[in-house]
Amino acid sequence: IKTAIGATGFHVMAEVRDDVHLQTQAPALMWKEDSLQLNFDVDSDKEWQYNNIGGGLFNGHRIFGYGVALPSTGGAPMVWRWRADCPGFAAGCAEPSIAPKITRKGDVTTYDVLIPWSALGLKEAPKVGSQLGFSLLVNDADKGGDRHELQFGGGIVDDTPEAYGILRVIEGK
């Protein structure tokens, strides 16, 4: 897994080695088979206010959850937004501004995803020294087999954004 930020968005590249690629689900259910989930807290520098029931939208934290997958039958990659705890965004829909490049060669699936800042409720890239909450989940399922996942950070499976990993924005060379 590699991550980077630029003027246009958050870039993630992941190579997944898997002897069987299976993705036959509708976009909203892609998590049941081979896919990648990416969750973000763009306000991870704010404190969590536990037991603040009236705080709304996770106490000011803007949380987003996306998924990308390559259909087994070929065709265009799928993109789905499961979570959007941010005013002006809907959950449970496709996100056309994200156009991943997903390729399969041999037993390796390469996910190359650029998420525009606007799809994360931001007008520009985070500044050097700031941070993003981030979690990535690789889903795997084979015909007749169990579903498995591998997660970087936490919080996707158990729906706890407080468990996301922290990525700090540093100056690139």
Image (cartoon, rainbow, N blue to C red):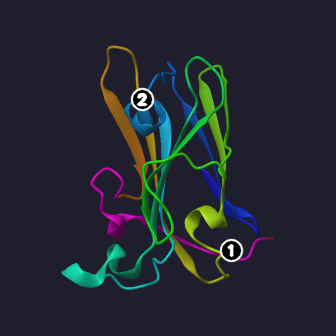
Marker disc for residue 154: none
| Residue on which the image places disc 1 | 125
Q: Secondary structure at mark 2?
A: loop
Q: Residue furthest top?
A: 144
Q: Secondary structure at mark 1?
A: loop
Which residue corresponds to the image point at 61% horizontal and 73% vertical from the top-left?
122
Q: Is residue 129 magenta?
A: no
Say how many tags the image has: 2
Q: Residue furthest right?
A: 173
Eyeballing the image, is 31 above or below 88?
above
The answer to whether the residues at label 1 and label 2 have Cβ atoms under 8 Å apart is: no
- Residue 38 pos. (x, y %): 50, 52
The foreground one among 17 and 25 is 25
Which residue corresponds to the image point at 42% horizontal and 31% vertical from the top-left?
140
Question: Splitting the image into 4 quarters, where does residue 74 fall?
Answer: top right
Region in magenta: 155-172
**Amino acid type of the residue tagged 1 in the rendering:** Ala
Q: Is residue 158 left or right of residue 70?
A: left
Q: Main secondary structure of the magenta part?
A: loop
The foreground one among 153 and 157 is 157
The foreground one among 102 and 83 is 83
**Amino acid type of the residue tagged 2 in the rendering:** Glu
Eyeballing the image, is 171 above or below 134?
below
Question: Splitting the image into 4 quarters, where does residue 6 fall?
Answer: bottom right
Q: Within 10 Å of the Cα at label 2, are there few (<14), some (14-19), or many (20+) other Cα atoms?
A: many
- Residue 7 pos. (x, y %): 76, 69
Q: Is residue 97 left or right of residue 39?
A: right
Instruction: Calculate the distance from the C-alpha at mark 1 to the C-alpha at mark 2.
Output: 32 Å
Is residue 50 visible in the rendered structure shown here? no
Which residue corresponds to the image point at 33% horizontal and 29% vertical from the top-left?
147
| Residue on which the image places disc 2 | 33
